[in-house]
């Protein structure tokens, strides 16, 4: 089930007469319930997938030479001998109390909530950094391509966009390291500086990873913006506005650009999940201590509760962003705001 | 060229970045490459997890990398793999076959307490305690009791002659490092594993799970306080990221290197590549309980059906040597360099052997299990391609991840799987563990009573030359039946920034023990 399907389905369920709440409240209420349902389903799917994968956390946690008794004790202690459904239910029970449990392997015995809280700002920083780069560059490229459509500028901007879409982020990451870090020595090739320690240092150290995550997104954004602008430019109301004697620039900004922003913002919102996907790979390459690298290591080590916690965090972020995008789009649509 | 905004956007950002760098350098607060002379950043590459720093519980290679700098054993290896003194000044056999160790006096633990025979007795008895369930218990399994003669003298009585004992008491991948009795009792095992206390040159200062550790010099170290006061040990999951981090100046040395990069890195003047044949063995693990590998002729046919030299070139980029058994060349007299027919490529002999088998090549369509995307996967690819070409089988490669592959080895859910071991210092850990019918690494279920007897006899023989001869004899006997398909032994590598000196590499892949030896220009 896609996220949006649930989003759209639920408000309808609660729009019956018995739920005679004010429309806005009903909307928000439905959205939150829908998000929780998606979280639950998502958590269950990930749980089953992890359990279906061969392997065992005790092999990672206790090491290759662990005697059978130690493995049995480990499984008993962490309830791994229980049926999968029981395990999921007890995990849910824990979550309901706001407890993610303890890590089994990656940070054995330590509380997962602390791990997530200490890693979340890092991932948020790199993700927002990448998003900012993608948005800023796509606004420029998309607009240039639309305004000078069919000209050289359009060709260049569009070519860059195609290149950005077709290049995998990990490949781009290594190319950037090779060219800008090892070749020109402009950026560090590895490591992370916390924004709290030095904001400029953080912007500098995380530029390459952010750019690697941003490039494919920026390309999609730019193409979307270009298409949306061209679509709007052809609308009769634009011609009307121009015929009233409004200037080119004014028409562009108020009639074309604003309306084209709605599909653009929607795409930006949808693409946030690619930020998270990019973060998972890129964090490992650059050694950034965020949630992405944590989740990968957790998955490899079969650290079930940690994978679950990372996944819930990621899913929650996606759902939150979707909600924000919807609100933003409502605000942007001139027909709704008036 | 690269990616998005090769034009204006990129350049603008680059200039912005440079501007920031210049500004910060001027301010002097820039956390970048320059190596301060009293600290070194020693990356652990290819690993992301350290579970414990308690030698009694340690099993993972990265755990040992750090342990070796935090603790000492009674003994140690020098660079020629001779057993030399460490916490013990000397040792001698006494009447009744016990080994007597004289401890150095005045050795201090990180908490200031002084090492005594009681700590040695405690450390070993803890390892032997079945309730403690140490993964390293087998190292001392032949020990009968530990006797304190005086505060600096301890005797180890074994149940019978046990040749590997001395190597198992070294500060290597053994778990027999010496702990402070009082501190362990006060903290409890769990806590001690996270806040370890040893006699080693460094003590644990900081530990961020999944990220790295910081070690601080142990000023009371018995060989004198280390020169470098701080060692940062980041955990770098991707080996290739370790290389870029070193090249970019973000770390000063690595614990490993990707084979594919080595030939090129050796030409780079900014770094030094240390390498030598390692104490490891790589093979195709076979499940002898299932068809077709329950048939010795089929196993022998497969073993003769591929060129190991081609594998070393394609998989290791030449960074290794082909092997004819499980005992690696770095074991010296224990290794038999003579080629064997059964581990030498010969298409005709392979097909003749196959003809004797009860299985037909065309029926063989199973998968060879491997994992990841790097050299482990290539071993399987090269193996499968060659065997199919020679014998007409239709083997395939099944790629999974290390945890799953290991789980399947243990549960027997495989027919053939790429496998290997590294860092083991004694012939017994290879021969007994992998090929003895009771060996715990004998995942394929191989059993040969005659070989079992020889392997057992080898560990009772205290004369090294005689013992080595028995080991070679046992290996020769076993390999004729090809219970595993021996492939190669790979080189071990450390990459060092050109500014770093003093690291002495040993074949078992040492690391933390060298931290006090390092100098930075």
Image (tube, helix red, strand yellow):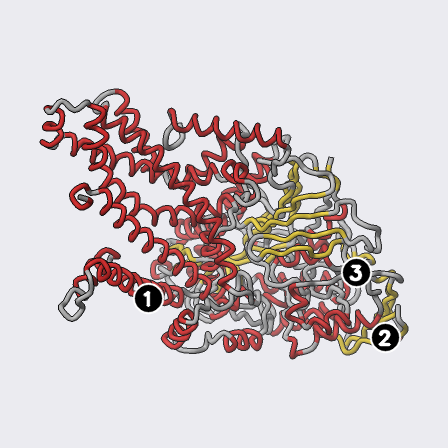
Q: Can residue B198 be seen in this view?
A: yes
Q: What element carries label 3?
A: strand
Height in image: A89 above or below B11?
Answer: below
Labels 3, 2: one chain: yes
The residue that mark 1 highlights is: A40
Q: Which of marks 3 and 1 is in front?
A: 1
**Secondary structure under the numbered disc 1 in the rendered image:** helix
In the rendered view of the protein, which quadrant contains the C terminus of chain B? top right
Residue B436: x %, y % from top left: 61, 70
- Do pointers 3 and 1 mark residues of a single chain? no
Q: Residue at label 3?
A: B75
Query: Which of the pair A26/B475 is nearer the observer?
Result: A26
Is residue B26 or residue B251 the one in the foreground?
B26
Residue located 29% across and 53% down the image: A323
Q: Is B7 situated above or below B122?
A: above
Position of B210 with respect to B520 (left or right) is left
């Amino acid at each position: 089930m896609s996220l949006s399907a649930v989003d759209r389905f639920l408000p309808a369920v609660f729009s019956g007469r018995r739920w005679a709440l004010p429309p806005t409240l009903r909307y928000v209420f439905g959205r939150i319930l829908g998000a929780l349902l998606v979280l639950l389903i998502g958590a269950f799917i990930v749980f089953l997938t992890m359990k279906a994968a061969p392997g065992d956390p005790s092999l990672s946690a206790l090491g290759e030479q662990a005697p059978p008794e130690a493995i049995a004790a480990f499984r008993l202690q962490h309830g791994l001998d229980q049926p999968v459904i029981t395990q999921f239910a007890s995990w849910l029970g824990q979550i309901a109390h706001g407890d993610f449990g303890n890590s089994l392997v990656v940070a054995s015995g330590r509380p997962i909530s602390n791990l997530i809280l200490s890693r979340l700002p890092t991932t948020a920083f790199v993700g927002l950094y990448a998003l900012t780069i993608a948005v800023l560059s796509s606004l420029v490229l998309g607009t240039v391509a639309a305004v000078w459509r069919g000209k050289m500028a359009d060709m260049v901007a569009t070519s860059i966009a195609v290149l950005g879409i077709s290049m995998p982020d990990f490949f781009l990451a290594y190319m950037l390291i090779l060219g800008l870090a090892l070749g020109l020595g402009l950026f560090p090739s590895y490591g992370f500086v916390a924004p709290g320690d030095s904001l400029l240092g953080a912007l500098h150290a995380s530029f390459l990873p952010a750019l690697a995550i941003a490039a494919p997104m920026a390309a999609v954004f730019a193409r979307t913006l270009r298409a949306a602008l061209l679509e709007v430019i052809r609308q009769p109301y634009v011609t009307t506005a121009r015929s009233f004697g409004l200037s080119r620039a004014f028409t562009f900004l108020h009639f074309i650009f604003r309306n084209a922003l709605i599909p653009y913002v929607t795409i930006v919102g949808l693409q946030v999940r690619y930020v998270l996907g990019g973060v998972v790979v890129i964090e490992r390459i650059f050694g950034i201590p965020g949630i992405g690298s944590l989740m990968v290591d957790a998955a490899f080590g079969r650290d079930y509760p940690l994978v679950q916690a990372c996944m819930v965090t990621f899913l929650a972020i996606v759902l939150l962003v979707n909600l924000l995008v919807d609100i933003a789009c409502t605000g942007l649509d001139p027909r709704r705001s008036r | 060229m690269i990616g998005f905004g090769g034009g204006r956007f990129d350049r603008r950002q680059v200039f912005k970045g440079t501007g920031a760098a210049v500004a910060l350098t001027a301010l002097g607060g820039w956390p970048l490459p320059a190596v301060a002379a009293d600290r070194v950043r020693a990356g652990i590459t290819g690993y992301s997890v350290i579970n414990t720093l308690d030698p009694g519980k340690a099993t993972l290679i990265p755990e040992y990398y750090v342990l070796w700098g935090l603790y000492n054993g009674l003994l140690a290896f020098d660079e020629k793999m001779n057993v030399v003194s460490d916490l013990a000044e000397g040792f001698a056999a006494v009447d009744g076959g016990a080994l007597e160790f004289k401890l150095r006096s005045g050795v201090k633990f990180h908490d200031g307490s002084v090492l005594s025979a009681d700590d040695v007795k405690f450390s070993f008895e803890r390892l032997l305690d079945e309730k403690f369930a140490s993964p390293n218990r087998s190292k001392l399994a032949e020990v009968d009791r530990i006797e304190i003669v005086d505060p600096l003298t301890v005797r180890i009585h074994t149940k019978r002659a046990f040749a590997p004992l001395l190597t198992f008491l070294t500060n290597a991948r053994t778990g027999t490092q010496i702990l402070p009795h009082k501190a362990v009792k006060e903290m409890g095992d769990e806590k001690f594993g996270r806040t370890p206390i040893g006699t080693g040159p460094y003590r644990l200062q900081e530990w961020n799970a999944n990220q790295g550790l910081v070690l601080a010099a142990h000023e009371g170290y018995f060989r004198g306080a280390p020169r470098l006061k701080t060692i940062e040990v980041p955990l770098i999951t991707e080996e290739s990221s370790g290389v870029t981090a070193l090249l970019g100046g973000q770390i000063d040395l690595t614990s490993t290197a990707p084979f594919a990069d080595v030939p090129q890195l050796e030409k780079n003047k900014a770094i030094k590549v240390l390498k030598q044949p390692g104490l490891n063995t790589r093979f195709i693990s076979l499940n002898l309980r299932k068809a077709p590998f329950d048939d010795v002729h089929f196993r022998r046919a497969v073993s003769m059906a591929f060129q190991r030299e081609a594998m070393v070139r394609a998989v290791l980029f030449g960074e290794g040597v082909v092997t004819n058994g499980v005992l690696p060349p770095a074991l010296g007299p224990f290794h038999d360099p003579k080629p064997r027919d059964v581990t030498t490529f010969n298409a005709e002999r392979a097909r003749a052997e196959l003809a004797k088998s009860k299985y037909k090549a065309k029926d063989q369509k199973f998968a060879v299990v491997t994992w990841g995307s790097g050299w482990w996967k290539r071993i399987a690819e090269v193996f499968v391609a060659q065997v199919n070409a020679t014998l007409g089988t239709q083997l395939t490669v099944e790629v999974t991840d290390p945890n799953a592959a290991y789980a399947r080895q243990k549960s027997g859910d495989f027919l053939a799987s790429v496998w290997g071991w590294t860092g083991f210092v004694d012939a017994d850990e290879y021969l007994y563990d992998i090929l003895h019918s009771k060996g715990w690494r004998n995942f394929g279920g191989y059993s040969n009573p005659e070989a079992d007897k020889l392997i057992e006899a080898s560990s009772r023989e205290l004369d090294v030359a005689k013992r080595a001869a028995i080991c070679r004899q046992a290996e020769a006997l076993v390999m004729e039946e090809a219970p595993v398909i021996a492939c190669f032994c790979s080189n071990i590598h450390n990459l060092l920034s050109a500014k770093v000196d003093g690291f002495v590499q040993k074949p078992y892949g040492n690391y933390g023990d060298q931290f006090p030896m390092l100098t930075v220009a």
